Image: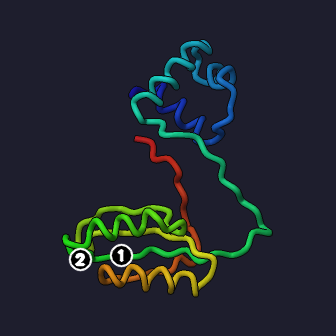
Amino acid sequence: MDDLDRKIIHLLAENARMPVKDIAQRVNLTSPAVSSRIHRLEQEGIIGGYTVVLRRPDAPARVEALISVLVDSAMREDFLAMIERESQVLQCFRVTGSYNFMVKVSCTDIDALEHLLTKMQKLGSTNTQIILNTQLDRNLALE
């Protein structure tokens, strides 16, 4: 990945619907050259997809949390299967330290979070931090 690829990725991160023609003008390349680079970045997995981020002020409030989970190796497959089924689970990371998983969740309310925690605690110990607000949100980390 070179500086032109990084510029293209940065532009797409700002506006994933930006026309190739506009990107080409901003990076001083032809439209076919930009299309080719975008296609290559997608094929290499550097661009993993495009999404819509909804920001509706009238949307119901949600409780988001980070849950550290310590799962015994004998229960690992059961744990992974359980979180795969739970729609409130946004992300799950394998981590180092006192816990072996970090799970980000978004629940409809505190009762739903408690219910999810109870399920997780049947498979391992947990430590939960409720997210109060987001101070920084980088959807794409540029190298």
Of the residues shown, which amino acid type is indicated by label 2? Ser
Of the residues shown, which amino acid type is indicated by label 1? Ser
Q: Nearer the viewer, residue 119 or 31?
A: 119
Q: Position of residue 133 (x, y in %)?
A: 59, 73
Residue at image location 50% in from the left, 84% down from the top = 115
Residue at image location 76% in from the left, 62% down from the top = 56
Q: Nearer the viewer, residue 80 or 58?
A: 80
* Count of marks, rendered view: 2
For disc 1, the marked residue is 68
Q: Residue furthest right?
A: 58
Residue at image location 59% in from the left, 17% down from the top = 28
Q: Quadrant of the N terminus?
A: top left
In the rendered structure, which disc, 2 or 1, sits on the residue that comes first in sequence?
1
Residue at image location 55% in from the left, 37% down from the top = 10
Q: Position of residue 99 (x, y in %)?
A: 27, 75
Kindly state the secondary structure of the residue where label 1 is placed. strand
Q: Position of residue 106 (x, y in %)?
A: 56, 71
Would you say the residues marked 2 and 1 are in contact, meaning their CB atoms lie under 8 Å apart?
Answer: yes
Q: Nearer the viewer, residue 53 or 82?
A: 82
Q: Is residue 10 above or below residue 123?
A: above
For disc 2, the marked residue is 98
Q: Nearer the viewer, residue 112 or 40?
A: 112
Q: Is residue 107 above or below residue 45?
A: below
